Image: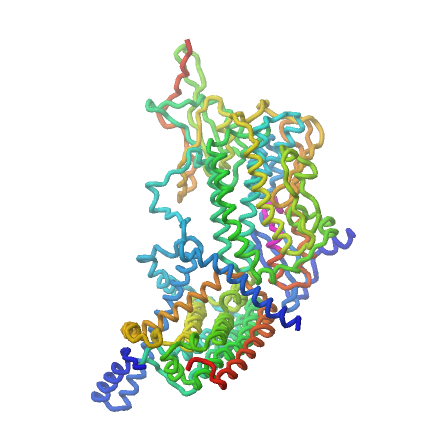
């Protein structure tokens, strides 16, 4: 099985009609080069070339202390910035056996879910635009602005926050945080039916996405495709259910699974996840304790005991894993990120073979790739 | 016969979903609602950012041109990529002893990643966020700022008696 | 039904008499030709610029934002600024492209749409060419545009352009059939292909009302097929930015690109104008039966205002399609034509012939 996978990834012969969906292209969502070899209109092989935005984050982490790593993790999958920060913070707290206050755990979970909704908004906008429905771009971003306004009020920045640190949070959230979040939930529940009638029910959309890019459960397990893309094929991989962290074991929510494995099921998984996140948010805001503590007591200089540590979280795109090897010093010896987009990208060849170019665009849109996460 | 019925019902169902989609955009055409565009350069006078907006790092000075920075250098140690350089000099204080005070607190705005570690770890609360966001310059050297104003001095801490 | 709407033929007759009195008949004819040509060129350019601006404003309102609003009041001069920018751009020469064909392609596209526009009836008495095979001429001439597209794609010597042009060629040729059949249904109703006769037969009511359901079906089918003819709306694969950069006009820059761009918008105008003429009554005002008072008031509005008003309503419909729906894939597009539009059209045409024979429609 692994030989097949390796042969799939190797570069093909250059006698075919090659088209480069090059690093600058309106629909590859970042700097990714796809070498597509075509036979007329049918795709024979897709070879991705990565590395155009490699910034050696893992190497830079080796010279920083654990609190300074946080601002680098923001910049990997920038649409789920809070969850990336949380991965490293949880790793440090579990290694040092520090107990954070309940309120901090609830706020972390609220921020995670808000980022998840915002990330799915951006995905919906860009997906509609790739398929040609250009108004979806503006409707999705208009609604995402409300979430970014909540973030700006509390943290001062809209996208890259570096807010969740080892020990708790950087500072307390704004006093309007709860009220604004509830208002947003009310506003967005009214807008979600519009999304449904504009894109989900549209017959042209069904024809473009049903039956396209089928991925069965075995393939998604073999390639390690997690997140909504994997759950669209029936692979039950939600880290919030398998290895709950924070307060997720006290919240009731469903894991959304579909069995068809085509582009339409992956689309439906994400749309229903947005609804599910809103239900989770309402429960969290209900149960959040009052007060204003925002951090546990921590030493200024953090030194992890010697050994290896691993922590998993569920970002908007899949399972993020952080692996740290420590020799007892202030800096980690080696930091390695297992990013979800890296595994999600390489299943593209398997899915796009035999389809048309238009299908390739739809499939890569449904896998929801963020390229800086692949290259780190 | 069944296939003919299915043919026509497919057409009707398809056209119905298309009409539903058109109603959404048509509604926005007729009653646009909220226009989300901000007319930026025209509304500069009335534009107010939120209090915590991360525009740049500033050192607030009070009306006597005094600040709170003691020149300890903790912000320089905590900055992950060297955006802060502290230059100190020794002066005699009122007892005649030579003490270290801040000469220049150099802040490289071009390299700052806005991670907030300098502000959080400052023991004297000397630096904080400013809300100015228009930093575009034609010359990169203008982005290196000296945070303490010329001629300013350290504000003495109030001694609780 | 007495129509006392102002007729432009009085104006044209007076100009004709004036010219003939001053110079020899041959020279007068030449001067008239030059006047008509210049008027058409001006109309083409001004309408093209206005349509581009209108599209940007309409799509902006649908998307909760303001369109262009900086250049001139309400952004009126935005298209002129764009045109000046395009004129000043460098015409990038391609070394290994077929130079003659590469330069010829934009001109073919413009000439085809120009020739089609010459036969449109703009107002009562303002129709430049009035053949007795009017509508047939328009359909034939607007098909010449596809030659321009194929030449553009082939001579650019670029993979993207070639794939885009081939797709576009297949699409346009297939949808010609539906366009022709939909318009044929109105020819059956009115009994003539000459445009002025078709309009005159709508003096007591537009065909879309007189022909009831079959005419409405024909109208909808014509709109769908017309949008596909002009490479617009949900059928704009040939220039889909997110798939193949810009399709067949990737390699064109400057004024040549402006030609393609302009021709696309003017084709949209022509499709809308034909729909207005055949289905919505051309320059005929909106009369209701015997309400002579109402009809009298409707007659005061000049016929040219009626024509342009109706055309812009149809143009708005076409724009609405584009900004709502995702794109169709090439095989789904051809599927739609050959399996759905063409059989429906054929059935509709047979049905219409039957009811015309039986006389079951409002005369």
Q: Is residue C230 visible?
A: no
Residue C297 spot, x, y in % from top left: 28, 72
Q: Is residue A5 left or right of residue C136?
A: right
User: Relative to the observer, which residue lies in front, A371 or A153?
Assistant: A153
Total labels: the figure holds 0
> Residue B94 location, x and y as percent?
39, 12
Coloring basis for residues: rainbow
Magenta stretch prevailing secondary structure: helix
Q: Quadrant of residue A43?
A: bottom right
Q: Nearer the viewer, residue B8 or C225?
A: B8
Where does the C terminus of chain A fall, quadrant-wise? top right
Depicted C239 relative to depicted C276: above or below: above
Q: Residue A315, position in %: x, y?
A: 61, 42
Q: Is residue B94 above or below residue C123?
A: above
Q: Is residue A244 left or right of residue A300?
A: right
Relative to residue A245, is residue C24 drawn left or right?
left
**Percent x, y for residue A237?**
69, 44
Residue A373 within the segment the image draws in magenta: yes
Residue C230 is a magenta residue: no
Taking the spot 36% from the left edge, 66% from the top edge, the residue there is: C50
Region in magenta: A364-376
Kindly tell me whether residue B7 is visible in this rendering: yes
The picture quadrant where one finds residue A289 is top right
Identified at 53% across, 25% down, the residue is A293
Relative to B138, is B105 above or below?
above
Check the image and report above or below for C129 versus A293: below
Question: In which quadrant of the rendered view does residue C12 lie?
Answer: bottom left
> C172 or C41, which lies in front?
C172
- Residue placed furthest toward the top: B161
């Amino acid at each position: 099985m692994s030989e097949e996978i390796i042969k799939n990834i190797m570069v093909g012969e250059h006698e075919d009609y090659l088209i480069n969906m090059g690093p600058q292209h309106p629909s590859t969502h970042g700097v990714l080069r796809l070498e597509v070899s075509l036979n007329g209109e049918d795709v024979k092989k897709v070879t991705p070339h990565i590395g155009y935005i490699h910034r050696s984050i893992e190497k830079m982490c080796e010279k920083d202390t654990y609190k300074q790593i946080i601002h680098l993790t923001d910049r990997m999958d920038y649409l789920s910035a809070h969850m990336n920060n949380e991965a490293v913070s949880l790793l440090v707290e579990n290694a040092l056996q520090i107990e954070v206050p309940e309120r901090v755990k609830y706020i972390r979970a609220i921020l995670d879910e808000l980022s998840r909704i915002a990330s799915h908004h951006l995905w919906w906008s860009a997906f509609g635009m790739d398929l040609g429905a250009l108004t979806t771009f503006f409707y999705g971003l208009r609604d995402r602005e409300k979430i970014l306004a909540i973030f700006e009020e509390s943290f001062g920045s809209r996208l890259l926050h570096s807010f969740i640190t080892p020990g708790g949070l950087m500072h307390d959230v704004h006093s309007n945080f709860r009220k604004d979040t509830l208002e947003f939930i009310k506003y967005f529940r009214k807008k979600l039916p519009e999304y449904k009638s504009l894109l989900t029910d549209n017959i042209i959309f069904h024809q473009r996405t049903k039956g396209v890019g089928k991925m069965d459960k075995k393939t998604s397990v073999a390639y390690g495709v997690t997140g909504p893309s994997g759950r669209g094929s029936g692979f039950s991989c939600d880290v919030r259910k398998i290895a709950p962290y924070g307060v997720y074991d006290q919240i009731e929510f469903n894991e959304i699974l579909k069995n068809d494995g085509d582009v339409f099921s992956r689309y439906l998984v994400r749309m229903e996840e947005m609804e599910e996140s809103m239900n989770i948010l309402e429960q969290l805001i209900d149960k959040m304790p009052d007060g204003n503590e925002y951090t546990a007591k921590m030493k200024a200089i953090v030194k992890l005991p010697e050994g290896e540590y691993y922590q998993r979280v569920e970002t908007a795109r899949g399972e993020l894993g952080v692996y740290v090897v420590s020799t007892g010093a202030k800096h980690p010896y080696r930091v390695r990120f297992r990013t979800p987009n890296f595994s999600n990208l390489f299943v593209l060849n398997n899915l796009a073979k035999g389809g048309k170019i238009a299908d390739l665009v739809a499939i890569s849109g449904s896998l929801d790739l963020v390229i800086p996460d692949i290259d780190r | 016969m069944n296939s003919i019925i299915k043919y026509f019902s497919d057409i009707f169902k398809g056209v119905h979903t298309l009409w539903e989609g058109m109603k959404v955009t048509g509604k926005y055409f007729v009653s646009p609602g909220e226009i989300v565009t901000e007319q930026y350069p025209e509304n500069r006078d009335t534009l107010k950012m939120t209090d915590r907006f991360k525009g740049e790092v500033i050192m607030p000075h009070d009306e006597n041109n005094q600040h709170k920075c003691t020149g300890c250098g903790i912000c320089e140690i905590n900055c992950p990529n060297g955006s802060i350089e502290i230059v100190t000099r020794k002066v005699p204080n009122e007892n005649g002893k030579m003490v270290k005070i801040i000469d220049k607190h150099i802040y490289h705005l071009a390299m700052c990643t806005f991670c907030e570690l300098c502000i959080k770890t400052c023991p004297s609360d000397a630096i904080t966020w400013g809300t100015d966001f228009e930093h575009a310059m034609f010359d990169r050297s203008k982005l290196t700022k000296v945070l303490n104003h010329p001629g300013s001095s350290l504000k003495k801490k109030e001694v609780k008696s | 039904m007495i129509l006392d709407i102002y007729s432009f033929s009085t104006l044209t007759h007076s100009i004709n008499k004036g010219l003939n009195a001053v110079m020899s008949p041959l020279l007068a004819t030449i001067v008239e030709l030059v006047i008509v040509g210049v008027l058409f060129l001006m109309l083409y350019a001004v309408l093209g610029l206005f349509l581009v601006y209108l599209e940007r404003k309409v799509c902006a309102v649908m998307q909760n934002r303001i369109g262009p609003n900086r250049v001139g009041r309400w952004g009126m001069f935005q298209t002129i600024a764009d045109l000046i920018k395009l004129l000043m751009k460098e015409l990038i020469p391609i070394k290994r492209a077929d130079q003659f064909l590469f330069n010829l392609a934009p001109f073919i596209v413009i000439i085809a749409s120009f020739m089609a526009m010459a036969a449109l009836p703009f107002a009562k008495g303002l129709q430049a060419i009035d053949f007795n095979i009017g509508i047939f001429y328009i359909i034939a001439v607007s098909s010449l545009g596809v030659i321009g597209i194929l030449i553009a794609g082939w001579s650019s010597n670029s993979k993207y352009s070639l794939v885009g042009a081939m797709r576009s060629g297949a699409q346009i040729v297939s949808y010609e059939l539906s366009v022709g059949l939909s318009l044929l249904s109105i020819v059956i109703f009115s009994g003539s292909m000459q445009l002025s006769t078709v309009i005159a037969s709508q003096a007591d009511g537009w065909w879309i009302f007189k022909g009831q359901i079959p005419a409405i079906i024909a109208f909808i089918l014509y709109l769908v097929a017309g949008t596909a003819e002009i490479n617009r709306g949900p059928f704009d694969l040939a220039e889909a930015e997110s798939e193949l950069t810009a399709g067949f006009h990737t390699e064109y820059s400057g004024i040549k690109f402006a030609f393609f761009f302009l021709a696309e918008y003017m084709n949209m105008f022509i499709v809308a104008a034909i729909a207005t003429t055949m289905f919505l009554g051309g320059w005929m005002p909106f009369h209701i039966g015997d309400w002579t008072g109402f009809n009298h008031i409707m007659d005061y509005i000049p016929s040219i205002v009626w024509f342009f008003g109706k055309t812009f309503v149809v143009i708005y419909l076409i724009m609405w399609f584009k900004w709502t729906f995702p794109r169709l894939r090439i095989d789904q597009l051809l599927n739609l034509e050959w399996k759905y539009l063409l059989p429906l059209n054929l059935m509709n045409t047979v049905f219409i012939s039957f009811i015309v024979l039986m006389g079951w429609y409002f005369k």
